[in-house]
Image (cartoon, rainbow, N blue to C red):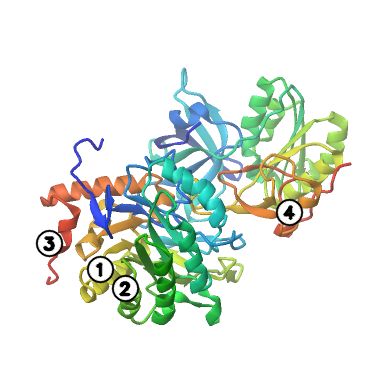
Amino acid sequence: MTPVRELCEVLERRRVGAYHALTLVAPGIAEGARPGQFVHLLAGQDRSFPLRRPFSIHRVERPGAALGTVEVVLDVVGAGTLALSRLRPHDVVDALGPLGRPFDPPPEPAGCLLVGGGYGTAPLFFLATELRVRRCRVDFVIGAATSSRLLDAMEAKRLGHSLTVATDDGSAGRRGLVTDPVGDLLARTGAARVYACGPMPMLAAVSRVAAAAGVPCQVAVEEQMACGTGICFSCVLPVGASGGLEPSPAGDRGSSEVTRMARSCLEGPVFDGATIAWAELGLPEPELSR
Amino acid sequence: MTAERRDLSVDLCGVRLTTPVLAASGCFGFGGEMAGWVDLAAIGGVVTKSVSLESRRGRPTPRMAETPSGMLNAIGLQNPGVEAFCAGDLRFLADAGATVVASLVGRSPEEFGRLAARLDGEPGVALVEVNLSCPNVEHRGEVFATDPEAAAAVVRAVRRATGTPVLAKLTADVTDLVAVARAVMDAGADGLTLINTLLGMAVDTGRRRPRLAAVTGGLSGPAIRPVAVRCVWQVAQALPGVPIVGTGGIVTGEDAAEFLLVGATAVAVGTGNFVNPRAVVEVADGLDHYLAAQGVSSPAELPALFKAER
């Protein structure tokens, strides 16, 4: 669906643990949005010419009976997110969306393992809702540095068949990385798909575990971005020459001769984890499945 | 929406532009990316992202950093190479009815000449723009546009290779811009694009590192607009009658009018496209409103109406 630009009224802003959830009245964006896509937000009319900030879509109410809203989750990390975190109901946000390539659901009902790190868990709730409509079994693993940085564990519990929680400091769930239980869960649930969103080292690790188990893995990356529309070439990452969600030939990975810089706003933010040249990003490569 | 708009068309180096508002190189992708946001045939023109003979991978990330009223970038001229450009992007733009200004980048005058020759006669290329803000491998990597002789050598090579009008894009990071402008005009350029990004740098103080992987990068956006307007003014004064495309931080119609008043024939919107994907259209609409408010019938009349004395 073609993205649009909408001036959106803020319906609600609420705290979710360490984060802020922002609900925008955005019928044009909400209508065609799919899980994994993002909105590109600009807060207020500022003479200092701020750039937009990208956020994956956390929740959608399709226009119809409802107003048509999209909800995003933001972590205050700088001036842009601080401005957005201070918005109040009835303030206006300039939004572009829905942008980017969504998650690809399995063609038939299948078991799906959803792995989220920190506020990167945000798009997985939207995804879980759609997967359940498609009669897929959904199992969640969510993790964060500490319990206040877990996103909406109760909602994950409600949407998922099972929920596994991991925190670095052990303040909630098991102590350790969110990626630690992924291998066991794949074996135990027999999941046929992995979907992950979170920091790049986590996505590299999940891709590696999924590849070792022979399970296709889609990851939604977060790259620094200016335009969101494919024209500035800031948000690139190295992918195998075949790129996108098509698996690349085994020999193609990791070498700069056969990888190319893909724009994550257009070809992503969802990529097949096996096509990303993690080694070029300084992260371990997925092992090849046999 | 534009039914009542006055005729905004201008003549740029013998090419009729529907409006004097182009999309600037490097800030509109290869054009096709924006087909869903603007009518490519209705805007003044698309200056493509620079193309080189061979594909270029570009720089590592981070490639971009937000700065006050602008941004720094170090993309590294990522492009698919001229053959893929001609087969894909250029064909798309031509089919869409866009007025295409093909931006060329090379490492030597000879490479620029070969690029110009390759594009000569390609359907849809109305003008070529020579991106001189890139390293000259034959001269210790010094940027062509900082040396009048090196810049002129590139323009001569391009001039020999093509019958298409040639714009030379210059940088303001020089002591004597007029000298460079005069040299490239004498070498056969038909017009000038002023200005490219200004070289800048920003530091992540917490991590005690540069904010860009390439350490330095090009500063763009409204932060550089006064520099760009000054450059257009200086060159227009020194070289009257030379067609100039003014660019640097244009986000509104009045911003565009600033450049036209001081002597530009047309303008190009760059970083503004990153925030507003319809910026090229909205700047032209804003210029139309400005002309109406000023009682001026055509953008081409603006330079003569400028009063240099306060």
Q: In the displayed structure, does residue B289 sit left or right of residue B245?
A: left
- Evaluate whether label 3 is on the same chain as label 1: yes
* Image marks 1 and 4: residues in contact by CB distance under 8 Å: no
Label annotation for residue B305: 3
Q: Going by the image, does B214 lie left or right of B109? A: right
| Total numbered labels | 4
Q: Which residue is mark 1?
A: B242
How far apart, in angstroms, are the residues tagged by discs 4 and 3?
A: 58 Å
Report how far apart the C-alphas of labels 1 and 2 lie in the structure: 8 Å
On residue A7, the disc is: none
Residue contact at pointers 1 and 2, CB within 8 angstroms? yes
**Label 2 neighbour load within 10 Å: few <14, some 14-19, many 20+:** many
Residue A129: quadrant of the picture: top right
Label 4 sits on residue:
A278
Callout 1 crowding tier (Cα within 10 Å): few <14, some 14–19, many ≥20: many
Of all chains, the one bearing label 1 is B
| B252 horizontally vs A151: left or right | left
Q: Tell which subunit mark 4 falls on.
A: A
